[in-house]
Amino acid sequence: MAETHHVYKLADRPRGTPTEDAFEYAEEAIPEPGPGEALVRTIYMSVDPYMRDRMRDTESYAEPWDVGEPLHCGVVGEVVESNGAGFEAGDVVTGELNWAEYATAPAAELTQVDPNRGPLSAYLGVLGMPGNTAYFGVNEVIQPHAGDTFVVTGAAGAVGSVAGQIAKLNGARVVGFAGSDEKVEFLEEDLGFDVGINYKEVDDYGAALREAAPHGVDSYFDNVGGPITDAVFNHLNVDASVGICGQISLYNATELPTGPRKLMNLIQTRATVEGFLVSDFSERFDKSAKQLGQWVADGTIQYRETVTEGLENAPDAFLGLFEGDNIGKQLVQVSEYEG
């Protein structure tokens, strides 16, 4: 094993859309695990839109990163050394680790996974945080019924693509917004969505919704916010259910738009709007993992990944999220699994 490795640190707090200048690519000594810790070699790392919020100096639902300190992300990796952490060299684990080739973590922050159950990358996507977000967001927050019209934004992303499929399993008619014709084809042909809408080719979101959902919207899984959400709120049915999962259209905004101005619609529709975090359901991840694993194994749930090769390209993969470059889960492959 080499004596040094590479790690990304936050170089500066970006204003507006981040650029490469926000990232520092440093070479450091490989850390040694302290008592009760394991040293993990990164195989795959996850980049996610919520990380943009961690670049700010204000508190949010995710703790902000400090300038000059390593960035953090979901990682699946191989244990290299265990210092009383209860793992053996060669074990595969997931956890919140650094954007780095190697990282240490306490045993309590790592979860061992079975590399024989499926591709390791899936533990950061459909079998990981995004899959759990979709599972609980649909089944416990929004709770669509058979015959409902279910709309999801960011529909070709890691969360939205799974959420729409789960809604279909619940008997809903599913409409998904995505950002290219290729993504719409993925939604309709591969995932079984009833209608896909390429929002980049639409001048009037309201008109597109009236055509795709002529009987209104009963359930809405919001990953994007902004004018698409405004349009959906104008089409909510009585007793509609809305789950607010993300607001990617606003993450790079230097000033938030005045609002909300659509709340008057909730008086007439008596709709329920609830924000949620996947961590709210952490005590029941075993349940979701078992069900998602079964659905993936038998082909009930389909998924796609966009994989960028090399730690040095992680900023490009992250910045591409805000351009809609990815289909499905965006990952960075840092090394090969040698197990």
Image (cartoon, helix red, strand yellow):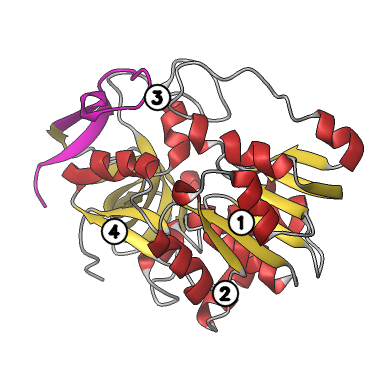
Q: Residue 238, percent across and down?
A: 89, 48
Q: Residue 251, percent across and down?
A: 47, 29
Residue that badge 2 annotates: 192
How packed is label 1: few (under 14 Cα within 10 Å), some, or many (20 or more)?
many
Q: In the rendered structure, are the residues bearing label 1 and label 2 in contact, judged by CB atoms less than 8 Å apart?
A: no
Residue that badge 4 annotates: 307
**Nearer to the camera, 211 or 142:** 211
Sequence order check, earlier mark of 2 and 3:
3
Q: Nearer the viewer, mark 2 or mark 3?
A: 2
Task: Tell me, yes or no, if residue 36 can be seen here.
Answer: no
Sequence order check, earlier mark of 3 and 4:
3
Q: Amino acid at mark 4?
A: Val
Which SS class for mark 2?
loop
**Nearer to the camera, 5 or 12:** 12
Q: Residue at x 38, y 39 (%)?
A: 322
Q: Which residues are magenta?
A: 1-26
Sequence order check, earlier mark of 4 and 1:
1
Which SS class for mark 4?
strand
Residue that badge 1 annotates: 134
User: Quick check: is 9 in the magenta stretch?
Assistant: yes
**Nearer to the camera, 338 or 335:** 335
Q: Amino acid at mark 1?
A: Ala
- Determine whether 89 is above or below 247 in the image: below
Which SS class for mark 1?
helix
Task: Tell me, yes or no, if residue 194 can be seen here.
Answer: yes
Residue 338 occupies quadrant? bottom left
**Nearer to the camera, 305 or 239:** 239
Sequence order check, earlier mark of 3 and 1:
3
Residue 55 is marked as 3
